[in-house]
Image: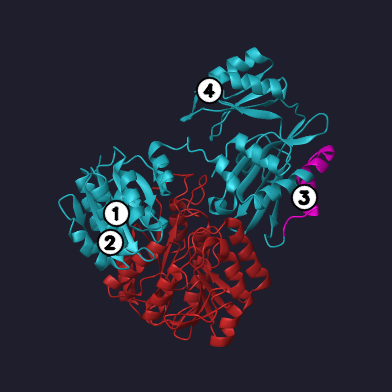
Amino acid sequence: MDLFEYQGKQYFARFGIPVSAGGVADTVDEAVARAEAAGYPVVVKAQVQVGGRGKAGGIKLAADADEVRRHAGNILGMDIKGHVVHRLWVEHASDIAKEYYASFTLDRAAKKYLAMVSAKGGVDIEAVAEEDPEAIARMHIDPSVGFTAADAAGLVESAGLDPEAREGAVDILQKLYRCYVEGDADLTEINPLILTPAGAVHALDAKVTLDDNAAFRHPEWDDFRDIDELDERERLAKSKGLQYVGLDGFVGIIANGAGLAMSTCDVVNQVGGKPANFLDIGGGANAEVMANALEVINSDANVRAIFINIFGGITRGEEVANGIVQALSRVSIGAPMVIRLDGTNAEEGRAILKAVESDKVISSPTMLDAARTAVSLAGGAA
Amino acid sequence: MSIFVDESTRVVVQGLTGGQGRFHGLRNRDYGTKIVAGVTPGKGGQDVDGIPVYDTVAAAVEATGANASFVSVPPRGAAAAILEAASAGIPFVVCITEGIPAHDEARVYNTLVDTFPGTRLLGPNCPGIISPGKCNIGITAGEIALPGGPVGIVSRSGTLTYQALYELKQLGIGVTTCVGIGGDPVPGTNFVDCLAAFEADPDTRAIAMFGEIGGSEEEKAAAFIASSVTKPVVAYIAGVTAPPGKKMGHAGAIISGSKGTAQAKMSALAEAGVHVVNNPTEAGIKMAEIVKEL
């Protein structure tokens, strides 16, 4: 789960990472109230999960209440690369002497954590990595060993941060590491990490991605759930706990397992169709899950045929078949569906499906044939 | 021959008394796998359909001589279960659990490397391993695999693994061992480990490899194949149509920037001399051609 900037800052604050005084506003009046509390001048920042907010006019400096009103009014409702702004973060504007960069993430190739610190912050760090890789100090951390104050000091020094910033940066790095590990984040990133003329170091931005798999031990994450960012189909899928990604084609896809679901999208594409979505019902999916999946696909008006591709391992064929039967009695499925069922208890599943087979519910034995049938029922290539 | 597991493998199932553990543990036994024990803390002394249950892995090992573990434990207990198996001296641990927190996974992987180098972990979030006709640990439906060889299979995706076994069986081609390494960001066993083992196994004469978008394991495999694999390799990479930046179910299956795309992986593999195909069915057909020439 990607956090919005304001959520990331709230999460940082839990771990003692200094951030600017500020607050959340959903209306112009709220923005003014937050600004008064934070103290002028303030920065009014659009809360959307997309880069380039500043360039799009979504981040503005305001010296008084009138300016806050004007900027907040402009930014609320603004469309930034397809993301509509519903919320603002208003914070006290900081004086900036220097901008740095700091992050923790997993280096999958090394199978260890990777800390990165740079004296070149405030810009796109991937561009820095391309053009001037030496400007980023990197350190691998063994998760079973941890990250010490000495490690942090070494990183800050090799990154070449200004001497007056080092003590503050070492402290923040240790807290950012705690936020990363104890906070079960996939990524904690501060860009920019700033040094003020007064010599203080603090986080001016917050980028946090939480590991959804760890939600069971973080009841406090419930506050962060915000599904405004999703399209309607994705919202419905999420509310039903399904792994769904909306695409722009016309063949609805349901498969079990991420690999098979991806492969199913690929095969539909190869035979001239276009997948409307990626939907993985996961391992061990039962009848209820299948019925939910069909409901989500059915809610997509672009879907002209449905391809259900199930290869049973942990998922049992008769459960899948029961789900399809259940869904057919629960919702009126508009598009014809082609079902390919194989693996664990596939024969039991196919026997159950026999009862509901029609010219709109078709069983097909192989993945390629099923894809061809589904695409032709959908009217072929668009 | 086969890799990692065979008819001498004696398996303890951690979580045998749970729903999934029981279902798949008994299926594995029905297949002919030597399931010698189960472990569930607090349930020592009971049995599951005649399989004795112990409180700890150490007790199960002492009583039954188990030399492999099948971890079927929910996410919150899986990391501890893997480490318990390792500290009991189990050399091969298969963990099918989906949804283990990434930090738990990273800690377990590095603890095994640092403290228990004698233990190989397969998974987590994987379908397991099957040496057809000899041993099946995990959730693979054993009847879809034809025993005997000459093909070894390694796959990141569970259902694509089944698909691969099935395609080969339709064509009458046997399999030495099929390893599902799983789709998580920190797999205990990777492509290179399996490619090296297949290269060393005289009965495996061709290798099928099923990868997917995200990460760089397929690129590493390509480099290893170029330098160290003499046997023919057929590869399929899923996710050609996946949009960048979206998580496609597997935590690992995400494209960031230009890295980890299906196209980049396919190019790297093709350059290493691998037969790269466009879908699982083509993989079977290509493999049939290769096997005929062996």
Image coordinates of residue A21 in percent, x first then y, are 71, 30
Identify the residue under disc 4: A76
- Frontmost of labels 3 and 1 is 1
Label 3–label 4 contact, CB within 8 A: no
Which numbered disc, 1 or 4, marks the residue that appears first in the sequence? 4
Tag 3 residue? A152
Q: Amino acid at mark 1?
A: Ile
Q: Main secondary structure of the magenta part?
A: helix
Q: Secondary structure at mark 1?
A: strand
Q: Secondary structure at mark 2?
A: strand
Q: Is disc 1 in contact with disc 2, using a CB cutoff of under 8 Å?
A: yes
**Which of the numbered marks, if any, corresponds to residue A308?**
1
How many angstroms separate mark 4 from mark 2 (CA)?
49 Å
Above or below — where is A57 with respect to A116?
above
Count neighbours of disc 4 (C-alpha within 10 A) and say few if under 14, some if 14 to 19, many if 20 or more: many
Q: Of the numbered discs in the image, which one, if any, rests on residue A341?
A: 2
Rendered hue of chain A is cyan
